[in-house]
Image (cartoon, rainbow, N blue to C red):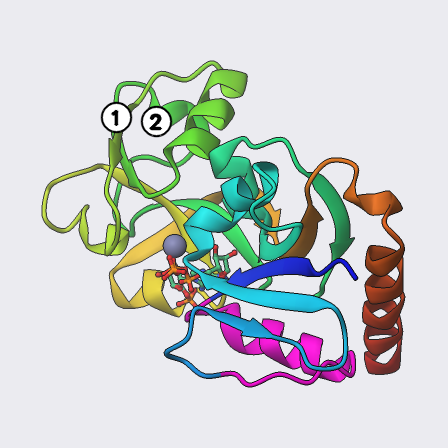
Amino acid sequence: MKTLKIAIQKSGRLNEKSVELLKNCGLSFDNYKSSLITQVSNFPLEILFLRDDDIPEYVQDGIADIGIVGENGIAETDVDVTYLQRLGFGKCKLKLAVPTHSDIKTVADLNGKSIATSYPVILQKFLDKEGIQSDIKTISGSVEISPGLGLADAIFDIVSTGGTLRSNGLKPFADVMSSEAVLIGRKGIESDALITELMQRIQSVMRAKE
Ligand code: PRT
Ligand code: ZN
């Protein structure tokens, strides 16, 4: 019998909820932190534990059949995958923010300014749509400290509670995108009987939570 492969985050903000969702679907598996791949014992499914950044491409290329990733992760990599289902966790917004006393108050004020982010693709698309030209500085982490260091005039980052912005003296002034964890699949996988079965289980877990 064919075995499906699902890619989920190895560690980080989506890992625990992804594992919990699969367990609530009645799937039994060992969740060893050290192993990168585990077999579900009561369903023909293998779980691959990956960096979230790698999941969209693994699914697009068919190395995994399906995956769980934040919508922002898909938008940033621009891959061609099928959205199967929103999962209701990992909710966040991608926002533009500036130091509290900045004279940048609107998106138009960003013309000619520099913006630090780990999400250059999403940001560039937004700026193009708004007709704004800014200097995007791509950095891989700690984006919130860049205005204080004089590296950028503004930042574009993920916000959930807003606590990180506040504690770094920043205030958000524009929402660019909302995101939550989604189940994605490689093109064509939606007609697979095992996927239909798994999605029915996910839907009943989600209904039970409502
Ligand atoms: O190691 P790996 O590459 O797999 O993980 P990662 O470090 O790249 O990602 P991770 O685990 O931080 O986030 C995975 C996904 O969770 C993101 O792509 C989002 O879809 C989602 N998510 C939900 C968040 C947040 N909420 C969030 N708050 N991702 C990051 N944050 C960070 C944000 O970058 C900022 O530094 O939390 C900080 C802000 O939080 P608040 O609550 O202070 O506003
Ligand atoms: Zn990542």
In three-dimensional space, the C-alpha distance between marks 2 and 1, rounded to whole angstroms, equals 5 Å
Residue 89 visible in the picture: no
| 55 horizontally vs 119: left or right | right
Looking at the picture, which amino acid does disc 2 mark?
Leu
Residue 64's mark? none
| Residue 12 painted magenta | yes
Q: Residue 98: percent from the left, percent from the top?
A: 31, 45
Residue 171 visible in the picture: yes
Question: Mark 1 and mark 2 in contact (Cβ < 8 Å)?
Answer: yes
Looking at the picture, which amino acid does disc 1 mark?
Lys
Q: Which residue is painted at 84% across and 59% down in the image?
A: 194
When the figure is inspected, residue 43 is found, relative to residue 104, above or below; the finding is: below
Closer to us: 99 or 41: 41
Mark 1 lies on residue: 113
Helix, strand or loop at label 1? It is loop
Mark 2 lies on residue: 110
Q: Residue furthest front?
A: 1
Q: Which corner quadrant holds the C terminus?
A: bottom right
Helix, strand or loop at label 2? It is helix
Q: Which residues are magenta?
A: 10-31
Closer to us: 183 or 148: 183
Closer to us: 163 or 108: 163
Q: Which residue is painted at 39% across and 40% down in the image?
A: 119
| Residue 143 painted magenta | no
Closer to us: 210 or 59: 59
